[in-house]
Amino acid sequence: MSEFVSIVGPAGILEASLDRPEGGGRWAVLCHPHPLYGGNMNDAVLDAVSTALKGHDIGVLRFNFRGVGGSEGHHDGGTGESEDLAAVWAWLLANEGYSPTILGGYSFGASVAWATARKLPSLERVLLVAPPLGHMRFDGAPPACPVHLIYGDRDEFVDTAAARRMDGVTHHLIAGADHFFSGRWVDLATAADTALG
C-alpha cells in the first residue's frame, strides 16, 4: 500500500507517494507527464513502470511537480521542476537510509529526468519513457550510467530519427504503440522489465 508523504521543495511542499521495497534498499524516483495537460503522479503509464520496478523489489517514489495536485508553487517550464526532482532525490537519500538508484520519467517527466540526471548522486540507471524528442530539449551527453529509451513507433511526440542519433542509450521500440501506449500496456511493462535487467 502506498504511503503519502510531504517533502519540502524549493517552491514549497511537494506531495509524494512511497511504495517501499519488501526486502531491499533500492529505490526509484518517477517523474510524471506535462502538468499543463493533466499530468500527475497517478498517471497510468507510470503505473506500468512502477509495477515492473516493484517486481524487482525496487521501492518507488512518485511525486507531483510544483503546482500539481497538493504540491505548492507554479509550473516553471521544466527548470523549477528539475529543482523539485533534485529535492525529492535528496529527501529520499536523507530519510530512507538508502540511495535512490533509478530515475524514470514519462514524456515531460523524461525531459526533466534527462536535464537533472547528471546532477544526482548514486544514479545507476535511467528510464526515459516516450521522451518528447523534437518537441523538448534533450541537450548534453547522457549521464555516466545505462540509459534506456522506451517508446512506440506510432508516437507522434517522439522524433525517432532524433532518438536514433542519441549516443550511449539502449532503445526499446514498441511496435504499434502511441504516446499513451494505448492497448500496449503489457508491452510497456515488458520493456520496462527488460530495461531493469
Image: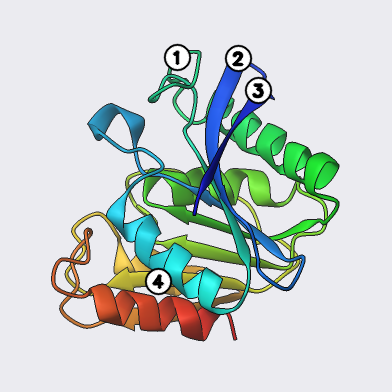
Contact, mark 1 vs mark 2 (Cβ under 8 Å): yes
- How far apart marks 1 and 2 lie (CA) works out to 8 Å
Q: State the SS at label 4.
A: strand
Q: Which residue is mark 4?
A: 150
Tell me residue 47's x, y (percent): 37, 59
**47 to 72, vertically: above or below:** below
Q: Residue at x 27, y 80 (%)?
A: 186
Q: State the SS at label 3.
A: strand
Q: Which residue is mark 2?
A: 11
Q: Which residue is mark 3?
A: 9
Q: State the SS at label 2.
A: loop
Q: Which residue is mark 1?
A: 74
Tell me residue 184's x, y (percent): 20, 75
Lower position in the chain sequence, tag 1 or tag 4:
1
- How far apart marks 1 and 4 lie (CA) works out to 29 Å
Q: Badge 4: how crowded within 10 Å, few (<14), some, or many (20+)?
A: many
Lower position in the chain sequence, tag 3 or tag 1:
3
- How far apart marks 3 and 4 lie (CA) works out to 29 Å
